[in-house]
Image (spheres, helix red, strand yellow):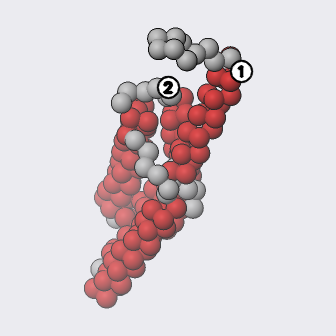
Amino acid sequence: MPEGEVMEIPPIDAELALAEVRARRAEVVDANLVPGWFWPSIGVLMLLFVAAVETGRPWLVAAGSVAYALGLATLIAALLRRSRVQVRNTLIGAHGAAAIVVFTLVLVGLGVGLGLALAALGVPAPATIACLPVAAGLAFGGPALMTYLRRVMLARPLAGPR
């Protein structure tokens, strides 16, 4: 083709190429979302750790701390082993980042607020009891957050900022 001449691409070829790019992007997004099993696992680990600490028994606090650290390390290692590629921060965008921040703040606020209220009322094991709805929030809210983030990432323009 002579220099300066533009090659004409048939519309159907352009559509097929764009569909392929979108399919590959969806694969990348799906491969890097936190899987559903991670959220309840974190909730259970957190609940067991808080319960162990709240006993005040040094041996149980130590065992709970070690179990939590090993469990968390195992979950993170499994998560990293599963992840094949790194999603760029620009793909998640401001809405995705805001959703993560709000999700985190709601769960922290719920746990701390409920724990303080239960402690003020003299309820035994207030932190452990307050951790129950937080663990449930992780188990059910985490997958919902991932669904939202997937929608956000797939809705971003293909030719985003570089």
Image coordinates for residue 71, horizontal then vertical, percent: 43, 74
Image coordinates for residue 115, horizontal then vertical, percent: 36, 58
Q: Are marks 1 and 2 in contact (CB under 8 Å)?
A: no
Does residue 12 appear anywhere in the picture? yes
At horizontal 52% and vertical 61% (from top left) the residue drawn is 82
Image coordinates for residue 35, horizontal then vertical, percent: 55, 56
Give the residue type at disc 1: Ile
Front-lying residue, 71 or 60: 71
Local SS, label 1: helix
Q: Is residue 7 left or right of residue 78?
A: right
Q: Tell me which corner region of the image, top left, top right, bottom left or bottom right, holds residue 100.
A: top left
Using the numbered discs, state the Cα–Cα distance from disc 1 to disc 2 in whole angstroms: 20 Å
Q: Residues within 10 Å of mark 1 (few under 14, many from 20)?
A: few
Local SS, label 2: loop
Q: Is residue 20 left or right of residue 159?
A: right
Give the residue type at disc 2: Pro
At horizontal 64% and vertical 22% (from top left) the residue drawn is 14
Residue 49 versus residue 24 in the image, above or below: below
Image coordinates for residue 160, horizontal then vertical, percent: 43, 27
Return the residue at label 2: 157
Q: Nearer the viewer, mark 1 or mark 2?
A: 1
Return the residue at label 1: 12
Q: Residues within 10 Å of mark 2 (few under 14, many from 20)?
A: few
What is the quadrant of the N terminus in the image?
Answer: top right
Residue 129 versus residue 156 in the image, above or below: below
At horizontal 43% and vertical 49% (from top left) the residue drawn is 86
Q: Is residue 61 left or right of residue 151?
A: left
Answer with mark 1 or mark 2, whichever residue precedes in sequence.
1
Residue 67 versus residue 99 in the image, above or below: below
What is the quadrant of the C terminus in the image?
Answer: top left
